[in-house]
């Protein structure tokens, strides 16, 4: 690892969260270095002729990249469209949302001809002679950018927002343009290495998860006795099952959504909220957010207890499934989940493995309705035939076998996830040090492995991009 020196001299930044910057860097404000463009307001009715234009909404703008898989169209007058039209090298930023997501941004490269943006997304158009757009996005990603939005944002119960004037006052400490270009080249090179590391770890996690699912699939469809006699299950995706197993609709084995958070709950009651972005393929993938009932989203309604299994009924291709393996009275799930509470004769953890199995998940995805956000009704889930061993003892034996075989895989998955977390923390610290001039990278020169395409670097995007159910809408309009 190359150790870079500090700059020769520094000046005070005169900001509580940033002590000093290099002496030759220029102190300025964003409004002096860029045009800040506001977007069109949705839902307006016009008395003049309109035209259809694609537009960016909050859900399309992620931290460091754009998610353009689902871009909507809007009808607006041509004069309005021209005022909100995006140009290559614009930096698009979110105007509101969760406080830690406020002001996230990415560079528009002209991917969609004639695209405009809505009013909950700003388009910042840097002066090309003084401000490198990518340098700006790195600054916004850094603790300096995050701190500014956290201090200046207008906050309601669980959302935050900024405005054009506040954004315009964003403090910039700018090196000469050529030095900005050098900083961007260096950080992009480091991003190339970090992206490849994360991609390799994600591929390893995928392989380990697939291996674990094969163990689960075999155990919950054939049991542990290789010589057991089989019978047709009557389930297309499952085939034959051990002769002594019972086949019933899921609703005969479990209660579905048995507990719901009351509207009369104490406003100060604080719970941990499980949304679709919290779980994947049988495990928690992020720390759960703590929310007071008074500030809770309207979809936070399903009460969870140890032994429940939850499965997402929206975006079903994500395999958002979790067996609740902890004692807690503060776990609340989104109404985007079906909560399955095992009945008599059902080992809770065994049910959790059945719901994770390919035979069950394949039926869920096959019976889901919708293309972009496929969903399934809970009544349809309840009619699915499920085969279970006739005794709890046999179910418990199968659970013990699955745990024994999959524990080394789970440990390897956990290590890989921790390594991804650590490399992301390193990247955050590196960006902070470089864009605020705490280290001097002017002497760095690129090597042959320091180049990566935008597609490769997209892996650096937040894992929540595909998972956050509260961004399925248009961002508060």
Image (tube, grey):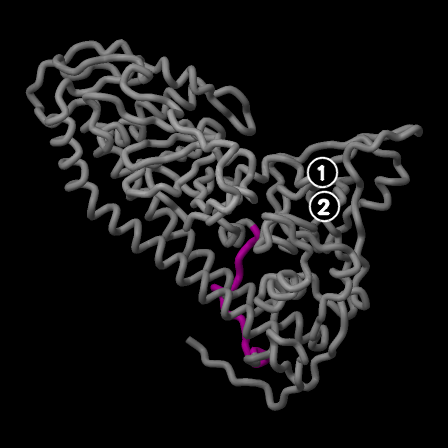
- Residue 110, horizontal then vertical, whole percent: 72, 47
Q: Residues within 10 Å of mark 2 (few under 14, many from 20)?
A: many
Looking at the rendered image, the quarter that the C terminus falls into is top right
- Residue 419, horizontal then vertical, whole percent: 36, 59
Tell me the residue at 80%/41% (across/down).
40
Looking at the rendered structure, which numbered label has been put on residue 120? 2
Tell me the residue at 54%/29% (across/down).
373
* Residue 27 horizontal side relative to residue 419, left or right: right
For mark 1, give the secondary structure: loop
First in sequence, mark 1 or 2: give its number.
2
Q: Which of 118/301 is in front?
A: 301
* Residue 31 horizontal side relative to residue 183, left or right: right
Residue furthest out toward the left: 227
- Residue 123, horizontal then vertical, whole percent: 75, 52
Residue bearing mark 1: 477
Instruction: Characterize the magenta stretch by its predominant secondary structure.
Output: loop
Residue 64 visible somewhere in the drawing: no
For mark 2, give the secondary structure: loop
The CA distance from mark 1 to mark 2 is: 8 Å
Q: Residues within 10 Å of mark 1 (few under 14, many from 20)?
A: few
Q: Is residue 338 above or below residue 456?
A: above
Residues at discs 1 and 2 in contact (Cβ within 8 Å): yes
Image quarter for residue 321? top left
Q: Which of 57/184 is in front?
A: 57
- Residue 315, horizontal then vertical, whole percent: 49, 30
- The magenta stretch is 441-454
Q: Is residue 106 above or below residue 355?
A: below
Q: Which of 296/144 is in front?
A: 296
Looking at the rendered structure, which numbered label has been put on residue 447? none
Tell me the residue at 77%/50% (across/down).
87
């Amino acid at each position: 690892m190359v150790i870079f020196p500090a700059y020769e001299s520094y000046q005070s930044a005169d900001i509580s969260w940033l002590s000093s910057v290099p002496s030759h860097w220029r102190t300025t404000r964003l409004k002096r270095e860029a045009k800040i463009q506001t977007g069109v307001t949705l839902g307006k009715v016009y008395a003049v002729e309109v035209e259809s234009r694609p537009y960016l909404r909050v859900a399309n703008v992620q931290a460091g990249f754009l998610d353009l898989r689902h871009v909507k169209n809007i009808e607006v007058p041509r004069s309005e469209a021209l005022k909100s039209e995006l140009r290559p090298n614009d930096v698009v930023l979110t105007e509101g949302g969760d406080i830690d997501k406020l002001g996230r941004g990415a560079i528009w490269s002209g991917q969609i001809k004639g695209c405009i943006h809505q009013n909950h997304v700003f388009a910042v158009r840097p002066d090309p002679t003084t401000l490198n757009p990518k340098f700006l996005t790195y600054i916004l990603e850094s603790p300096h950018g995050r701190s500014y939005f956290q201090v200046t944002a207008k906050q309601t119960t669980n959302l935050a927002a900024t405005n054009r004037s506040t954004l315009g006052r964003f403090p910039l400490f700018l090196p000469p343009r050529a030095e900005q270009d050098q900083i961007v080249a260096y950080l992009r090179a480091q991003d190339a290495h970090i992206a490849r590391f994360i991609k390799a770890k994600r591929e390893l996690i995928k392989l380990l998860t697939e291996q674990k699912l094969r163990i689960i699939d075999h155990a919950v469809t054939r049991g542990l006795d290789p010589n057991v006699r089989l019978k047709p299950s009557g389930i297309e995706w499952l085939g034959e099952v051990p002769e002594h197993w019972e086949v019933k609709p899921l609703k005969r084995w479990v209660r579905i959504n048995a507990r719901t958070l009351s509207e009369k709950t104490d406003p100060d009651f604080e719970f941990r909220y499980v949304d679709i972005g919290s779980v994947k393929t049988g495990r928690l993938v992020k720390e759960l957010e703590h929310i007071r009932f008074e500030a809770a989203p309207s979809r936070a309604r399903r009460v969870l207890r140890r032994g429940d299994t939850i499965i997402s009924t929206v975006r079903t291709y994500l395999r958002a499934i979790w067996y609740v393996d902890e004692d807690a009275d503060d776990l609340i799930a989104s109404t985007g989940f079906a909560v399955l509470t095992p009945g008599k004769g059902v080992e809770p953890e065994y049910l959790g493995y059945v719901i994770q199995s390919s035979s069950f998940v394949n039926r869920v995805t096959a019976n889901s309705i919708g293309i972009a956000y496929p969903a399934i009704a809970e009544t349809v889930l309840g009619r699915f035939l499920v085969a279970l061993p006739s005794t709890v003892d046999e179910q418990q034996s199968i659970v013990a076998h699955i745990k024994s075989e999959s524990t080394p895989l789970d440990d390897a998955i956990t290590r890989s996830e921790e390594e991804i977390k650590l490399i992301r923390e390193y990247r955050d610290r590196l960006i902070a040090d470089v864009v605020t001039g705490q280290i001097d990278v002017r002497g760095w020169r690129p090597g042959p492995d320091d180049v990566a395409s935008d597609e490769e670097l997209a892996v650096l995007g937040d894992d929540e991009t595909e998972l956050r159910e509260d961004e399925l809408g248009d961002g508060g309009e």
